[in-house]
Image (cartoon, rainbow, N blue to C red):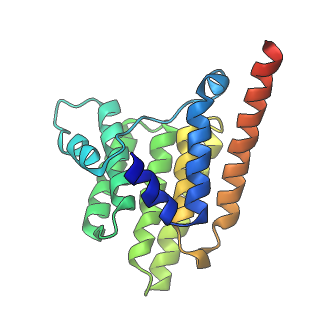
Amino acid sequence: MTAIIKMLLARGPLTRAALAISVAFLISAPALAEDFVFPTPIPFTNSEREALFAAVSGETTSEQRKQAYLAQLARLTSMEDAELQDVEELEALMQSLVESLPDDPELNAALGSTTSFKSSFYLDRLAKLSLFSRRGNRMMDRAVKQSPFNLGARLQRGISCANMPAFLKERATLLKTWSWLGNRWAIGSVKNFLAL
């Protein structure tokens, strides 16, 4: 766990802010429980994420597949040497799962995150980079609009924006997402304090 935190802290100020807000949410989970839908839990280490993804079989339920696909997305986005083929394979798997769970905002946001992550493989081809980035962002925005209190969808969008190249100018979306989450966390804490 310490190694993961050190890795995230080394990535830059936006990732540090995302980590700080995530920790604040974990600490204040009881204060938020009445208003929010919490994200699907996934393993912390890449080896555990890979094992969860590899365990998907024909008898796996839709919810188990969703958890495995979210874990695989987290694994791929945290790897320095992720390959486009793996991302496209995950995108296809998520797309087929979205067809069976069309109203799941976290899954829809994860599909958008996967699509926008694909843009990072086309830094030398601006047309494709822009296409995948915009398409993914629209999917994530639609998922958040569908269910504004789903923290999984909001966190997918925030983390995806934090990982995008700076010239795509997604920092405003990132800051809007984190400030919304921070304000909601503060409101939940005040509600609990006043209820004492």
Q: Is residue 150 visible?
A: no
Place residue 63 in its image quadrant: top left
Instruction: Kindly identify the residue that appears in the image at 62 percent across and 55 percent down.
Output: 17
Q: Nearer the viewer, residue 108 or 79?
A: 79
Locate residue 158 relative to residue 122 in the image: left or right: right
Left or right side of 193 for 166: left
In the rendered image of this protein, does residue 114 appear above or below residue 28? below
Please state which of residues 33 and 86 is positioned toward the viewer in this rendering: 33
Residue furthest top as drawn: 196
Please tell me how many numbered marks the rendered image carries.
0
For the point 59% across and 75% down, which residue is it? 166
Where the C terminus falls, by quadrant?
top right
Observer-nearest of 49 and 145: 49
> Considering only vertical position in the picture, is 2 above or below 59?
below
Residue 72: x percent and y percent?
Answer: 31, 50
Q: Nearer the viewer, residue 42 or 120?
A: 42
**100 sits left or right of 152 in the view:** left
- Does residue 108 appear anywhere in the picture? yes
Dividing the picture into quadrants, the one containing residue 29 is top right
Quadrant for the N terminus, please: top left
